[in-house]
Image (cartoon, helix red, strand yellow):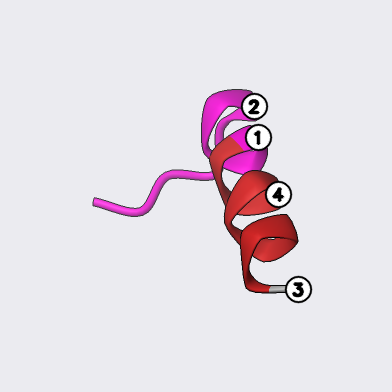
Amino acid sequence: MMMLDSHSILIIGICLICLI
């Protein structure tokens, strides 16, 4: 279910920023 697409990268980036 975890696909490395540009969309997923954006979501992961936002999540990482939120965690920081």
Q: Viewer-nearest of labels 4 and 2?
A: 4
Q: Name which residue type carries label 2.
A: Ser
| Residue 12: image location, x then y, percent | 59, 52
Q: Name which residue type carries label 4.
A: Gly
Separation of marks 4 and 2 at Cα, in angstroms:
10 Å
Q: Is residue 13 above or below residue 11?
A: below
Q: Viewer-nearest of labels 2 and 1?
A: 1
The answer to whether marks 2 and 1 mark residues whose Cβ atoms lie closer than 8 Å is yes
Separation of marks 3 and 1 at Cα, in angstroms:
15 Å
Q: Residues within 10 Å of mark 1 (few under 14, many from 20)?
A: few
Instruction: Check disc 3 and report the residue beneath it.
Output: 20
Instruction: Check disc 4 and report the residue beneath it.
Output: 13
Q: Name which residue type carries label 3.
A: Ile
Residue 18 figure quarter: bottom right
Q: Residues within 10 Å of mark 3 (few under 14, many from 20)?
A: few
Q: Name which residue type carries label 1.
A: Leu
| Residue 5: image location, x then y, percent | 56, 32
Asked if the magenta segment contains residue 6, the reply would be: yes
Left of 4 or right of it: where is 18?
A: right
The answer to whether marks 4 and 2 mark residues whose Cβ atoms lie closer than 8 Å is no
Instruction: Check disc 1 and report the residue beneath it.
Output: 10
Q: Viewer-nearest of labels 3 and 1?
A: 3
Taking depth in this image into account, of 6 and 14 the one nearest to the observer is 14
Separation of marks 4 and 1 at Cα, in angstroms:
5 Å
**Residue under the point 65% across and 41% down:** 9
Q: Residues within 10 Å of mark 2 (few under 14, many from 20)?
A: few
| Residue 4: image location, x then y, percent | 55, 44
Mark 4 vs 2, N-terminal side: 2
Mark 4 vs 3, N-terminal side: 4
